[in-house]
Image: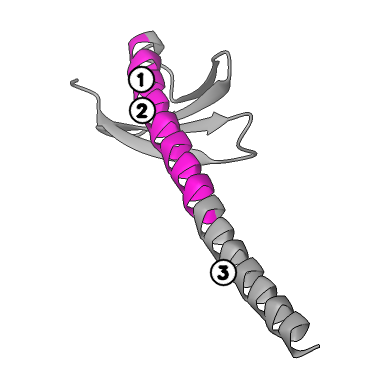
Amino acid sequence: MRVRAGVLIQVLFLLVVFTLVLEFYLFTTFSNQRNILSQTNRIKAELMADLALKKIDGDKKTGTILFTDASCFFESSDNHYILRITFDHNHGEVYQINRDKER
């Protein structure tokens, strides 16, 4: 009976260790995936901001430009634009980018 209890304790110990290793692996994998998605969205937002600046007329003070998977709201003040890029699939993640008008 003692041998069975010892084997059971060893199996439970190995199960706990395996669970902790699996949890660490899944956490780092999902964290890495979120980081890559965030960086990709940031690059897309920068590109969309550049495209939006090329499309904005000089007279307009505010407006919205729609892209395939995002929208760009812009405001114009004295010497710069404020661009807010919102991605549809991120439920309201907003990138605010300030640009000079002379650019």
Name the image quarter holding the C terminus.
top left
**Label 2 amino acid?**
Ile
Name the image quarter holding the N terminus.
bottom right
- Disc 3: which residue: 17
- Mark 3 or mark 1, whichever is nearer to me: 3
Q: Tag 1 or tag 3, which sits nearer the N-term? A: 3
Q: For this rendering, which residue is in front, 37 or 75?
A: 37
Identify whether 87 is placed above or below 3: above
Badge 2 marks a residue whose secondary structure is helix
Total of numbered circles in the picture? Answer: 3
- Disc 1: which residue: 47
Badge 3 marks a residue whose secondary structure is helix
Query: Where residue 75 sits in the image (x, y, percent)?
Result: 43, 31
Q: Which residues are magenta?
A: 27-54
Q: For this rendering, which residue is in front, 103 or 90?
A: 90
Identify whether 42 is placed above or below 3: above
- Mark 1 or mark 2, whichever is nearer to me: 2
1 and 2 marks in contact (CB < 8 Å): yes
Query: Where residue 68 sits in the image (x, y, percent)?
Result: 58, 13
Residue at (40, 39) in percent of width and height:
96
Badge 1 marks a residue whose secondary structure is helix
Which secondary structure is most common in the magenta stretch?
Answer: helix
Residue at (77, 81) in percent of width and height:
4
**Label 1 amino acid?**
Leu
Q: For this rendering, which residue is in front, 9 or 30?
A: 9
- Disc 2: which residue: 43
| Residue 92 magenta | no
Residue at (39, 11) in percent of width and height:
57
- Mark 2 or mark 3, whichever is nearer to me: 3
- The Cα atoms of the two marked residues, 2 and 3, are separated by 39 Å
* Residue that protrudes farthest toward the left in the picture: 102
